[in-house]
Image (cartoon, grey):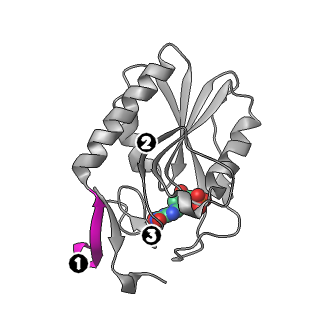
Amino acid sequence: MEAEIEKIIISEADIKDRVRELAERIIADYERKELTMIGILNGGLIFLADLIRHIPFAVKIDTVRVNAYAGNATYPKREADIVDSIRLNVKDEHVLVVDDILDTGKTLLKTLDIVKKLNPLSVKVCVLLNKQERREREINPDYCCFEVENRFVVGYGLDYDNRYRNLPYIAVLREKQDK
Ligand code: XMP
């Protein structure tokens, strides 16, 4: 796998530090509140798993599965599709939606739409990466670990054609991997 990587843009150590810092902010903001964290599959899986293990109070966890890409494309579909929705009742709970990256904004906006219909007390967005330059929808993260430039990135949950999710860092692939 490593032969296919052009360069590492965020190291494993930097991810660990920022995830811990961000968890401290979440702890301060949600202590003594009923918090449900909703991870977006598959990309948000690893970030969610690392984040929740820093949280010392009870949180509920659920997931939503969203399809943003067709096959092995590096450009998202026109609209993201919710293919498996949340199961928990989040009425009167605080909700934090967790994803790997906020890119065009379609995936998170679609997820927020379905969560808001369930009448939670509040809904906020938490992402590992923010790719501001490619935004097509009006949405900003409430919690974010890193800003990234407009390049297709993989690792730490992010994939190309379902590969590279298990890399412990964020990297850019060599040119021949791109479409
Ligand atoms: P949108 O465009 O809806 O994108 O904000 C969010 C979802 O698309 C995936 N995504 C990426 N995956 N490298 C990836 O491996 C990228 O650079 C990238 N940009 C977006 C991601 O799964 C996210 O949930």
Q: Secondary structure at mark 3?
A: loop
Magenta stretch in the rendered image: 1-10
Decide: is 32 above or below 100. above
Relative horizontal placement of residue 118, taking residue 14 as reference (left or right):
right
Determine crowd level at label 2: few under 14, some 14-19, many 20+ residues with C-alpha closer than 10 A: many
Residue designated by label 1? 3
Q: Residue furthest right?
A: 117
Considering the image in quadrants, where does the N terminus appear? bottom left
Decide: is 94 above or below 109. above
Could you tell me the amino acid type at mark 3? Arg
The x and y percentages for residue 120 are 69, 27
Mark 1: C-beta under 8 Å from nearest atom of ligand 1: no
Could you tell me the amino acid type at mark 2? Leu
Q: Is residue 9 magenta?
A: yes
Circle on res. 151:
3
The image quadrant of residue 90 is: top right
Distance from label 3 to label 1 (Cα)? 18 Å
Determine crowd level at label 3: few under 14, some 14-19, many 20+ residues with C-alpha closer than 10 A: few
- The mark nearer the N terminus, 2 or 1, is 1
Relative horizontal placement of residue 112, taking residue 149 as reference (left or right):
right
Q: Secondary structure at mark 1?
A: helix
The residue lying at 63 percent from left, 23 percent from top is 93
The x and y percentages for residue 150 are 48, 67
The image quadrant of residue 107 is: bottom right
Residue designated by label 2? 48
The x and y percentages for residue 97 are 56, 40
- The mark nearer the N terminus, 3 or 1, is 1
Distance from label 3 to label 2 (Cα)? 23 Å
Mark 3: C-beta under 8 Å from nearest atom of ligand 1: yes
Q: Secondary structure at mark 2?
A: helix
Q: Is residue 96 magenta?
A: no
